[in-house]
Each structure stands twice: as structure tokens, then as C-alpha cells.
Amino acid sequence: MLTTKAPKETRALGEALADLAHAGDLLVLAGEMGAGKTAFAQGFGSGLGVETPITSPTFTIVREYVGRALALHHIDVYRLDSMQEAGDLGLGEMLDEAAVMLVEWGDAILPALPTDYLEVRITFGDGDDDRRIELTPVGAAWSARRRSISETVAPWAHDAGASAGGASDPC
């Protein structure tokens, strides 16, 4: 379990994880409205070298940004009414490019997404700006980076495993 105490920390976490991104990667961002999915996406984009301000794509559904080495496709499926609409977005084509795809509310359309992704689940913490962030690698590509992910996010790791007598693994 990871924790952040302010939106800038959530952005910093996203920026750090961007260093591990490869072309064709998918990140599924899950969490309630206002939990910090877009703040995470802003940091992730910054880590990819995106200089354009990243805003929520809620009404446009898809926003594309150019980074240093990889493009970023930032998608928000909150307003989609069906899996058919998700399929009509051409998600597969976006993953074939030299880009990384972040899908806000992606857990709602998992059957329409590839089976290899990093789930980033953001929930509210105790304080107004506190967030709990759980990373779950699904599939071979992200699972192979489990150690790198753990090392990268160590500054945000909540040491729950140590208090239970076990080793802590933030993802």
C-alpha cells in the first residue's frame, strides 16, 4: 500500500512510475470521483516529458500528448454507456503505437482491454488530501517489472507487511 499526503505527491508518484514505461504499456486507473486519477496522470505525463498541461478527458474521452520518447493516450471511459462504445474507441490501435495508454475508470471496461496492465487503484485516506494507492501488475509485462516497481515506489510505501511480521511489497 502506498500513501500520498497531497496532490503533488500523487503526481510525483506517477512521474516516478513513468520511468518504467515501455511502448504499448497500459495502466488502468481506478478510484472514486476526485480520488486523484488525473493528478496521477499529470505526473505520469510529466515523467514521459509531456510539456502540454494534462487535463481530465472526461468530456472528450481521449486526449493525446507527445512526450520525449513515448506518446501518452489519456482516456476517460466514465461517460461511456456500453462495452460496445469502449470497443469503438480503437484501444488496440492506440496500444500498437509508440505510446503508453492510461485509462481512467478502466476497471469498468476490463473485458474490452488487453490482459496485460498495471492497475493503479487510488482511494481516499484519513486526511482531506491523503490518498492510498495500490498497484497491481496483471499479465507478464508488468509482473516482470514487479521488483523495479517496488524499488521505484519505495518512498511512498506504507510498511504494513513489516508490522505483520512479513516483508513489505508495495505491489
Image (cartoon, grey):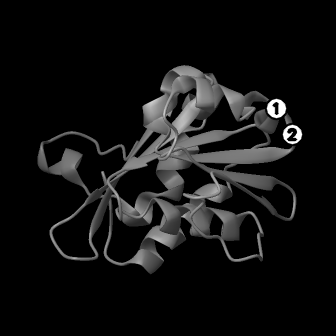
**Which residue is rendered at x = 82% and y = 64% of the image?**
67
Instruction: Indicate the position of residue 96 as horizontal and vertical percent values.
Output: 84, 32
Question: Judging from the image, what secondary structure is the residue with disc 1 in?
Answer: helix
Q: Between 164 and 78, which is closer to the camera in this rendering?
A: 78
* Cα separation between marks 2 and 1: 7 Å
The kind of residue on which mark 2 rests is: Glu
Give residue 66's quadrant in the image.
Answer: bottom right
Q: Position of residue 108 (x, y in %)?
A: 43, 33
Q: Quadrant of residue 58?
A: bottom right
Q: Which mark is residue 124?
A: none
Q: Is residue 113 visible?
A: no
- Which numbered circle lies on residue 97? 2
x%, y% of residue 119?
47, 40
Pinpoint residue 146: horizontal percent, then vertical percent: 52, 38
Q: Residue at x 43, y 59 (%)?
A: 154
Q: What residue do we see at 32% from left, 53% from top?
A: 32
Q: Secondary structure at mark 2?
A: loop
Question: In the picture, residue 68 is in which quadrant?
Answer: bottom right
Dot 2 and dot 1 residues touching (CB under 8 Å): yes
- Height in image: 134 above or below 47? above
Q: Is residue 10 left or right of residue 123?
A: right
Q: Residue furthest front?
A: 81
Left/right placement of residue 119 relative to residue 124 reads right
Residue found at x 59% / y 34%: 142
Amino acid carrying label 1: it is: Glu
Residue tagged 1 = 93
